[in-house]
Amino acid sequence: MGGLLKFITCGSVDDGKSTLIGHMLYDAKLLYADQERALELESKLGSMGGEIDYSLLLDGLIAEREQGITIDVAYRYFATENRSFIVADTPGHEEYTRNMAVGASFAELAIILVDASQGILIQTKRHARICSLMGIRHFVFAVNKMDLVYYSQKEFEKIEKEINEFARKLDLRDITVIPVSATNGDNVTNRLNNMNWYKGKTLIEYLETVDVDDALMEEGLVLPVQRVCRPDYSFRGFQGQVESGCLCIGDEIEVLPSKQKAKVESLFNTDRNVNKIHEGQAVTIKVDREIDISRGCVIVKDTSLKVSDTFKSTVLWMDDTELMEGKSFLLKLGTKLVPATVLSVDYRIDVNTGEQIVSDKLNKNEIAVCKIGVTEKIVLDEFEKHRSLGHFILIDRITNMTAACGVVNHVMRRTDDLFWQEMDVTRNVRANMKNQTPLTLWFTGLSGAGKSTIANEIEKRLVIAGKHTMCLDGDNVRLGLNKDLGFVEKDRGESIRRIAEVAKLFNDAGLIVITSCISPYELDRDTARKIIGNSNFVEVYVSTPLSQCEKRDVKGLYKKARKGQILNFTGVNSIYEMPSNAEIVVDTTYMGVEETADYVMSKLDEYLSLKY
């Protein structure tokens, strides 16, 4: 079986992953003379008593060599007469599970090492689950260090039975178990005399012949758009990589989520005109008519992908902090980047037993089934059907670090059976009766910044000008509509969503709405903007600094927060994310109420055409 094979080595700490691959490279004469000499010299300084330490070929970091462990993922390309390979040697320490998951994301096959003297460990099972989660369907369990159990067939068969039982629980479909000694080379590339009872293939023989092309074939053309190419006014092309299927000139394509259709006018592979493109190729597509296509859209043909804003998923949590229900992230799926919230943690999965444990939070390196919602409908599908649009990562909005990776289990489409009921009396009719433009003025800032005072003054001036208004103060709403919510991030997000939905209804009634709420997270304010509509949303950032707000402390809340009597208080023990695109910015440090209101009203004139 020819072709390139991409595989990963993983398992628990000190199971011999780096040594195994290093010995494979050494025995197969795949090293340059200077590499071989350097290996022999460096081994004399190590912990192998002068014997060759094959792990040094893979462990390149100083910290790895000092500790004798793998920390980062090491990629190596090599080839035999029968096949080419790329191997990712990944760390076994639980602390570096994130790195292991990165290596698994590229592989078609996993070699999971098991220490013959210890058997299957928790980290071994975790790595197997992660590999399965990442879509790997072919597994080799290399029972290593057979020399430590005196090459005992009985010990090997005992571990083989344990592996088969675990594989059945995890539903691993294609597994092979091979006894090896990575240090001595038994059954790695050569068949020595220590295990004559083993009649199967050596590891390298198996890798040279295994067929990984029997994986699930994805249905139809799937091409996530990465970039819109516009070199001049006469050409607009859409660029991306074909994840599955093929496409020819003249084919009719559909663009999701808009469901617009067009025909392919021309295809370019790099700078060459082509008549047809295939899976794995990068392409620029030009269509026969102008339709709205942007990064994150998906071009499809002869397949049915789903469009939704809610789905169930299995996730591997990789952040140091706990994952709590209601936490918000950026979700990267395909070429789409969109704000997302973990709506619920249904249960976590015990990596040792596979047991489903009810939990509403998740710690580092734990796996769980979660419900995730995004702020707009995106194109996705179950991982088993379309892998390219069935796996995703969650990115922390503050640190920009990858906090979790996961796969889509089930797309939820609850809103598909609900339809907006159009009324004869429309928003425009109501607005025209009131002779005004419905708008939401969204005041945000720290407690004590002056939001409510300014909002109150603005409403008075609008009423004097003959406008019809409604003011939604954050505290007032919490005493009624939001009385069931607390102040953790999840509840704050829900509070802002509810206020935005109410504001939109008041706008539909033709009213000008003034809201005054801290709304500390930019993602929540962006969500409010999407609900209300960008053209109807004016963000007013009261940028009074924390020191001035705390000096005022009109309600005595800062004093209580500093004493620990109030938890999750913005500015003290909870963050405030400053707006990056506010339409109006005011600072009440040196401006009084009248002066601030004058400034805001002057800015509002362009939105409301005020005459008062």
Image: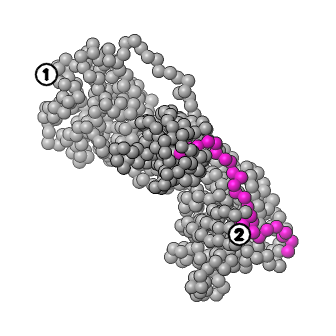
Which of the 4 image quarters holds residue 519? top left
In terms of secondary structure, what is the magenta stretch mainly?
Answer: loop
Provide the residue designation for mark 2: 82
Residue 486: x and y in percent read: 43, 35
Q: Which sits in the foreground, 109 or 254? A: 254
Q: Dots 1 and 2: beta carbons under 8 Å?
A: no
Number of callouts in the render?
2
Residue 460: x and y in percent read: 19, 23
Q: Assign a secondary structure to mark 2.
A: loop
Residue at the image position 66 percent from the left and 85 percent from the top: 51
Up-down relation of residue 538 to residue 145 (above or below): above
Which of the 4 image quarters holds residue 175? bottom right
Residue at the image position 40 percent from the left and 44 percent from the top: 236
**Which of the labelled discs sits on residue 314, or is there none?**
none
Q: Which sits in the foreground, 294 or 94? A: 294
219 in the magenta segment: yes
